[in-house]
Image (tube, rainbow, N blue to C red):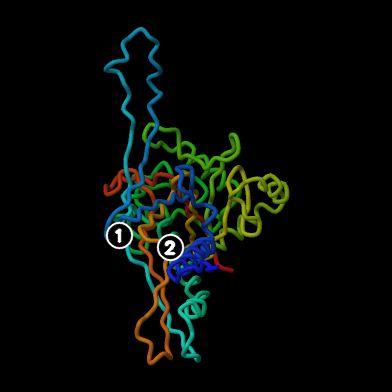
Amino acid sequence: MTNTTISTAVRAKQWDNKLFMEYVRASRFKRYMGSGENSIIQVKRDLTKKKGDAITVNLIGALDAAAGANDGTTSLVGNEKALPNDGHKITVKVVRDATVVNMEEEQASAFDVREAGRTALKDLAMRYMKNDIITALGSIQGVPYGSATATNLNNWTVANSDRVLFGDSTANYNATFATALNNVTSTMKLSKNVVSLLKRLAQTAKNANGEGIRPFTYGEDEETFVLFVNSYAYRDLKIDLETVHENARERAKTNPLFTGTTSLYWDGVVIREIPEIAGFNNTATTPVACAPVYLCGAQALAVAWAKELMTTLRKEDDYGFQRGVGFFELRGVEKILWGQGSTSAKDWGMATGFVAAAAD
């Protein structure tokens, strides 16, 4: 009898698949990812694409109901309604890195080398993914927040006036971003009232003949948003929710986006702590430490893969003593925009808030 053996190529592929799933799961954003249009972070895969190519996320608006339905007294021919549609193109790029492992045994196999660098590489790939998602959340019409000019910020503020909140009141809004941010005072911390206000902004924002930013839906008719916040904003909200936290927690247990240990729940919104979200000071006479908070509905972000994570080995081995192991993938992470490339581009599935969040 001849035994079946698994080829080296198949074993390597299985190892890569496991590493890919583990690193995505460890990024803290796995539960918000999915291939459907209902997902907070929509995942697209097109393995035919190459570096520099784009993978498109299709956006479909709602048919306009303002004019009412045809009641049969007029012809429907020539009176059909146009279906609003757009597409957001995500450019994929190379993401790779490597480490060198010293092997005492000359006969160590390729899988031993992979395993030796596995934990470190998975952690590094996870941090790259997490950082790219956080950058996308705060991006200004496709420009990273830290690179955005005053003109970029002002254009974004005007285009997204129906889905941006400064402090604890819509009265703090100003078309000039810096002026609006300076309206945030030290008492305007993240609270349950701010969460509810930000949710109402999302619900009333206008999306291409639609009725607000679409929430994530689950069960028969349950709807929810997810609010990503840093640790200081999370701290302030947790204090504000102390008297109602236990009841809110019980209601949240059936929500698939609720994590328990790093989540709060209020008014149909899951609040998720992401410590790496950076804060900054405004430029008021007495500067206030501020933090952005991101209320996300369906199709807020997209991750596009043209090549999923795979391991690579270095050929130069210093006479068998040094073995290099690395990873490589082709992907892109972006906030989804309606009207991408224009100064009037809107954040398709997100409302953004800025609150006071002083360090401990």
Percent x, y for residue 92? 32, 59
Which amino acid is tagged 1? Thr
Instruction: Please tell me which residue is depicted at 30% across the width and 47% down the height of the picture.
Output: 340
Q: How far apart are marks 2 and 1 (CA)?
A: 21 Å
Viewer-closest of 313 and 297: 313
Label 2 belongs to which residue? 285
Percent x, y for residue 303? 41, 55
Viewer-closest of 248 and 130: 130
Instruction: Please tell me which residue is depicted at 65% across the width and 59% down the height of the picture.
Output: 261
What label sits on residue 149 in the rendered view? 1
Q: Residue 9: tell me if it is visible.
A: yes
Q: Is residue 166 above or below residue 95?
A: above
Percent x, y for residue 127? 47, 68
Q: Residue 242 vs residue 112: left or right? A: right
- Element under disc 2: loop
> Could you tell me which quadrant the N terminus lies in?
bottom right
Q: Residue 221 vs residue 184: left or right? A: right
Q: Do the CB atoms of the residues marked 2 and 1 lie less than 8 Å apart? A: no
> Could you tell me which quadrant the C terminus lies in?
bottom right
Front label number (2 vs 1):
1
Which amino acid is tagged 2? Thr
Q: Residue 278: tell me if it is visible.
A: no
Q: In this view, does 52 lie above or below 348?
A: below
- Mark sitting earlier along the chain (2/1): 1
